């Protein structure tokens, strides 16, 4: 069965080219790759990564379970992360983690976790994921939240749990992107709100051909 993005209704308002990734239909582009690349390099872009894997670990010995997935993650501090291109492990509290991974990896990761030592929840289908990129993305965030997200205060690798446009989310920051994981049923509302405030700073929707999924802090 094909899985659809929570932005599938938004897609219908654009000349979207769809692609299939691990059973998900996701936007490859929004009709013009060249235009998307220009905005990524000069202005700001919003991309749908709702197809990525999302696994939460909560309670019990979540740190030990996280270590089974990604060595070293039991030692990172809350609201920090460890990552590579395929996966990011976000420590939300002393005993809560959120694992983000390339689409299709979640089944193998779930098989590695000892589910007797922590509560494991696959949130892949229940959580959406939008990503802000481009040199003017900070201006979009400044118009979207009262929280101080300046990059000298919230550096790459940081994790924030807050609200943007009243939508509660986990935000993971890399050098070039702000990755926002949030409830699936609020994805369209968040998308519309970000696009509304981003018009003045060149914000456009783009596909995964322009912004491929990668979780490394330096990217």
Image: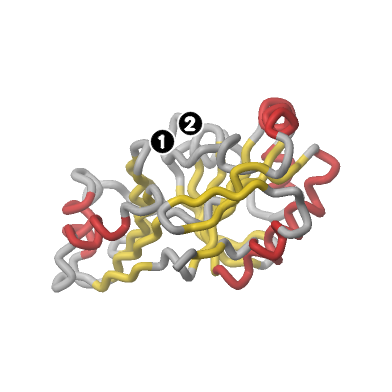
Q: Is residue 218 above or below residue 106?
A: above
Seen in the image, is 66 located left or right of residue 214? left
Residue 69 image position (x, y, % from top left): 22, 51
Which residue, given by chain and number where applicable, does mark 1 sit on?
A: 216
Q: Which mark is residue 58?
A: none
Q: Disc 2 to disc 1, how far (Cα)?
A: 6 Å
Numbered-mark total = 2
Residue pictured at 59% horizontal, 53% vertical: 130
Residue pictured at 75% horizontal, 31% vertical: 35
Q: Residues within 10 Å of mark 1 (few under 14, many from 20)?
A: many
Element at label 1: loop
When asked about the image quadrant of residue 13, the answer is bottom right
Residue 126 image position (x, y, % from top left): 48, 70
Do the residues bearing badges 2 and 1 touch, measured as CB atoms within 8 Å?
A: yes
Residue 82 image position (x, y, % from top left): 33, 42
Element at label 2: loop
Extreme residue in the front direction: 1
> If the image is split into quadrants, where does the N terminus sit?
bottom left
Residue 23 image position (x, y, % from top left): 44, 58
Residue pictured at 67% horizontal, 29% vertical: 37
Q: Residues within 10 Å of mark 2 (few under 14, many from 20)?
A: few
When asked about the image quadrant of residue 119, the answer is bottom left
Extreme residue in the right direction: 200
Between 73 and 2, the one nearer to me in the picture: 2
When asked about the image quadrant of residue 71, the answer is top left
Residue pictured at 42% horizontal, 41% vertical: 215
Between 195 and 155, the one nearer to me in the picture: 195
Which residue, given by chain and number where applicable, does mark 2 sit on?
A: 219
């Amino acid at each position: 069965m094909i899985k659809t993005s929570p932005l599938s209704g938004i897609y219908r308002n654009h000349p979207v080219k769809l692609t299939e990734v691990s059973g998900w239909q996701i936007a490859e582009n929004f009709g013009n790759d060249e235009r998307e690349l220009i905005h990524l390099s000069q202005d700001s872009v919003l991309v749908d990564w709702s197809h990525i894997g999302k696994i939460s670990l909560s309670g019990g010995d979540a740190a030990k379970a996280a270590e089974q997935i990604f060595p070293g993650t039991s030692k990172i501090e809350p609201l920090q992360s460890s990552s590579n291109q395929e996966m990011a492990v976000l420590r939300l509290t002393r005993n809560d983690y959120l694992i983000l991974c390339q689409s299709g990896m979640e089944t193998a990761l779930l098989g590695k976790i000892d589910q007797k030592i922590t509560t494991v929840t696959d949130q892949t289908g229940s959580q959406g994921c939008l990503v802000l990129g481009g040199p003017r993305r900070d201006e979009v965030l400044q118009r979207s939240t009262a929280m101080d997200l300046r990059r000298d205060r919230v550096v790459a690798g940081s994790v924030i749990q807050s609200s943007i446009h009243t939508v509660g989310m986990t935000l993971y920051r890399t050098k070039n992107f702000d990755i926002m994981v949030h409830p699936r049923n609020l994805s369209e509302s968040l998308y519309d709100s970000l696009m509304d405030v981003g018009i003045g700073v060149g914000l456009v929707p783009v596909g995964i051909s322009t912004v491929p999924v990668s979780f490394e802090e330096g990217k």
